[in-house]
Image (cartoon, helix red, strand yellow):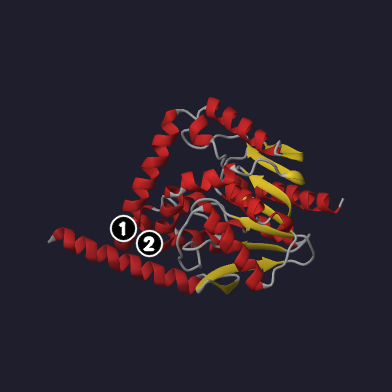
Amino acid sequence: MVLAGLALLGASYQQIGQALDRHAVHAPGRHVTVNNVSMHLYCTGEGGPTVILEAGAFGFAQAWAWIQPKVAEHTRVCSYDRAGLGWSEDATPHDGVAAARRLHTLLRNAGEHGPYVLVGHSLGGPLIRIFATHYPDDVVALGFIEPSHPDQLERFPPEAREAHERVVRVLSVAAELTYVGLLRLANPLGRLHAGLPADDYRAGCMFTSAATHVRASQKEFAAWDTTMAAARSNISLGERPVVVVSGTEPMEGMTADILALNHQLHAEMAGLSKHGRHVTIEGASHMSLLTRREHAEQVAQLLNELVDSVAR
């Protein structure tokens, strides 16, 4: 009886909280239909080439809140929410090839024409490699921000694979716990985006405590091997300008050895292009490159230089 009462109380807390959030924060962009699904796209600035921002795991368009305005001063730039994330409706499957195809259709249907400079953070790194493989004529440059490497679970110690599989299991449970308000109360995923402007951080907390967003994130993690196999097939970026950005600070639980190996993997990714470079930002971490304003502005400057290199 007590548990039933707590569950009812938690469900009320969740529903009221989501309602208050949706009254307070709004989608900054527009909704575009992609294969009968509504997807959120937010484009600002003018000029070309158009920069496309691909968020990482648990990500959403507003995770680029510090970076997008700075890039928009320089050229056209678009962020968006993948299926099931942020303001976008859900669709299946959630592997990287499906994500790339949806993004291509989204941009076409929205009238946002190439050429594109693709930028991916974390999981977004493999996703933009897949897009470049499927639509090579549309892509003129790529920026990787603390990107996932297709081989990292094979080259990291075995514990990395075990941790990944544990995340997949935990997220399955977490998606169910959203209904009784436990993710909203504890806010473990929302805190990843602490440091963003207040409304964007609130939107992030709203998304990451909602079942649809968490479940879509779980499915993206579950599709890891399929996604990375597709990214791995991209063995060269040719002569496109490429920048790979790393932070110097480890993620929680990451040893110095793993951090060094991660930097090695990032350098290898820069080597996919004849015009690739690997840049580290002192004092930055995996998430602070997006969420800490001074770090994000350094990333934006590197992206603006990448856009300029296309013209040169």
**Considering the numbered disc 1 on the image, is that residue within a helix, a strand or a loop?**
helix
| Residue 279 appears in the figure | no
Q: Is 183 left, or right, of 3 in this rendering?
A: right
In the rendering, at what x and y percent does residue 132 appear?
66, 52
- Residue 285 against residue 12 in the figure, above or below: above
Most foreground residue, 112 or 298: 112
- Residue 47 against residue 188 in the figure, above or below: below
Q: Are marks 2 and 1 in contact (CB under 8 Å)?
A: yes
At label 2, which amino acid type do we have?
A: Ala
- Residue 82 against residue 260 in the figure, above or below: below
| Residue 261 appears in the figure | yes
In the rendering, at what x and y percent does residue 88 appear?
50, 67
Using the rendered view, name the quadrant where residue 62 is placed: bottom right
Residue picked out by circle 1: 176
Instruction: Tell me the quarter of the image containing the N terminus.
Output: bottom left
Most foreground residue, 83 or 170: 83
Using the rendered view, name the quadrant where residue 40 is placed: bottom right
In the rendering, at what x and y percent does residue 72 appear?
73, 62
**Considering the numbered disc 2 on the image, is that residue within a helix, a strand or a loop?**
helix
Most foreground residue, 39 or 209: 39
- Residue closest to the far left: 1
Q: Give the numbered dot on residue 223.
A: none
Name which residue lies at 35% across and 57% down. 175
Name which residue lies at 54% across and 36% down. 151
Q: Is 142 left, or right, of 26 in this rendering?
A: right
Residue picked out by circle 2: 211
Earlier in the chain: of badge 2 and badge 1, it is: 1
- Residue closest to the far right: 312
Alpha carbon distance from label 2 to label 1:
7 Å
